[in-house]
Image (cartoon, rainbow, N blue to C red):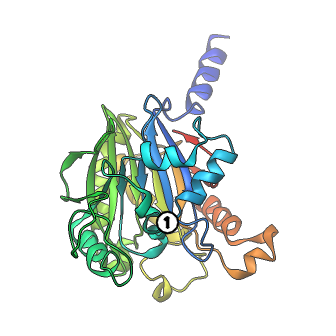
């Protein structure tokens, strides 16, 4: 009987939540292209906080409307949410599927709101978007005249900084996205962490160590059960040729990168070192055929391919627009 109780306890422990939820993630947009009302954008806050940090801004106002309709937010006033509850926007890179919702909403934002990005991304925003040819400059730097509706803040790499008007801090890591500068954000609340990837290719394809460097940074957090989730892109099916990935991941590369992380966390037991760790699968690129054949769409196929290759026991999460995740 005693051995049976021990066995049951171990089973329950191994199947319990990875760690108690600390963060709430509200997907405003989940796709990596094509469907313009549902593009990469996530709101993040601690369970205790009222203010969100935006992680990219591909879809913004429409995403807030969907979230309000799904009753995922207490305040259903989209104007209040947009102007008062999102003090900071972290932009991983300057591609439109991560940006266009923020661009369209920018005239409605307020002075206390901050747009944050690494130097290369901020330069791209100011020179190529907020330049009075493509869009007005509603910020406080860049192409004159500055309308000073918001503050632009350039983020240093590999340094912890506070996210304004939130209880969070962020460290920005460089990523290689087909040779373009992209970013990952490691976000901290006290001793708890969550990791968000912008677009990234696999190290093996990009001839880079960018992902490996991040894995080395977070490995101790995983060992100590301080990392609550990783949001990682998987844009294409495995059938996509390596030379047509354009700086993105597909399921076999996605899982290969996570196996590399498992080997760093515990090289003696790869199958258990990440077991139960939530991995939110972002940036899937739908195809036109998906909208006429919803029973076998790209998202389902990618999740199925990931599941078949998931020999390390991570928890794969497919986010849905407007549906809150507690992690």
Answer with left or right where residue 220 lies relative to residue 275.
left
- On the image, the x and y values in percent for residue 65 come to 63, 52
In the rendered view, would you say 122 is above or below 218? below
- On the image, the x and y values in percent for residue 56 come to 42, 60
Residue to which mark 1 is pinned: 101
Q: Nearer the viewer, residue 1 or 146?
A: 146
In the rendered view, would you say 277 is above or below 285? above
Mark 1: which secondary structure? Answer: helix
Quarter of image, res 109 = bottom left
- On the image, the x and y values in percent for residue 228 come to 44, 40
Farthest residue toward the bottom?
243
Q: Nearer the viewer, residue 281 or 109?
A: 109
Give the quarter of the figure containing the N terminus: top right
- What residue appears at the point 45 percent right and 32 percent down from the top-left corner? 22
Quarter of image, res 299 = bottom right
Are there few (<14), some (14-19), or many (20+) residues within 10 Å of tag 1? many
Quarter of image, res 180 = bottom left
- What residue appears at the point 68 percent right and 72 percent down from the top-left corner? 298
Answer with left or right where residue 188 lies relative to residue 123.
right
In the rendered view, would you say 13 is above or below 106? above
- What residue appears at the point 30 percent right and 79 percent down from the top-left corner? 131
Q: Can the viewer see residue 92?
A: yes
- On the image, the x and y values in percent for residue 91 come to 36, 62
Q: Can the viewer see residue 310?
A: no
């Amino acid at each position: 009987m005693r051995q049976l109780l021990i066995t049951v306890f171990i089973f329950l422990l191994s199947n319990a939540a990875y760690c108690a939820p600390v963060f709430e993630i509200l997907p405003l947009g989940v796709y990596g292209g094509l469907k313009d009302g549902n593009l990469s954008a996530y709101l993040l806050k601690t369970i205790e906080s009222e203010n969100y940090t935006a992680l990219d801004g591909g879809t913004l106002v429409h995403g807030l409307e969907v979230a309000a309709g799904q009753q995922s937010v207490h305040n259903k006033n989209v104007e209040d949410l947009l102007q008062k509850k999102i003090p900071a926007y972290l932009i991983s890179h300057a591609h439109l599927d991560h940006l266009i919702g923020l661009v369209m909403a920018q005239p409605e934002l307020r002075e206390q709101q901050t747009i944050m990005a690494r130097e290369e991304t901020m330069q791209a925003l100011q020179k190529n978007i907020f330049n009075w040819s493509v869009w007005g400059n509603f910020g406080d730097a860049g192409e004159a005249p500055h309308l000073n509706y918001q503050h632009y803040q350039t983020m240093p790499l590999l340094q912890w900084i506070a996210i304004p008007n939130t209880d969070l801090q962020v460290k920005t890591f460089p990523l290689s996205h087909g040779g373009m500068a992209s970013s990952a954000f490691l976000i901290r609340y006290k001793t708890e962490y969550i990791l968000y990837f912008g677009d990234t290719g696999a190290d093996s394809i990009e001839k880079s160590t960018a992902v490996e460097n991040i894995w080395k940074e977070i490995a101790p957090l995983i060992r100590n059960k301080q990392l609550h989730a990783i949001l990682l892109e998987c844009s294409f099916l495995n059938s996509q040729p390596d030379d047509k990935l354009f700086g993105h991941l597909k399921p076999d590369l996605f899982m290969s990168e996570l196996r590399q992380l498992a080997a760093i966390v515990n090289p003696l037991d790869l199958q258990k070192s990440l077991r139960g760790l939530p991995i939110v699968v972002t940036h899937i690129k739908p195809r036109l055929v998906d909208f006429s054949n919803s029973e076998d769409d790209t998202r389902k196929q990618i999740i199925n391919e990931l599941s078949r290759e998931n020999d390390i026991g991570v928890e794969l999460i497919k986010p849905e627009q407007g549906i809150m995740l507690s992690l």
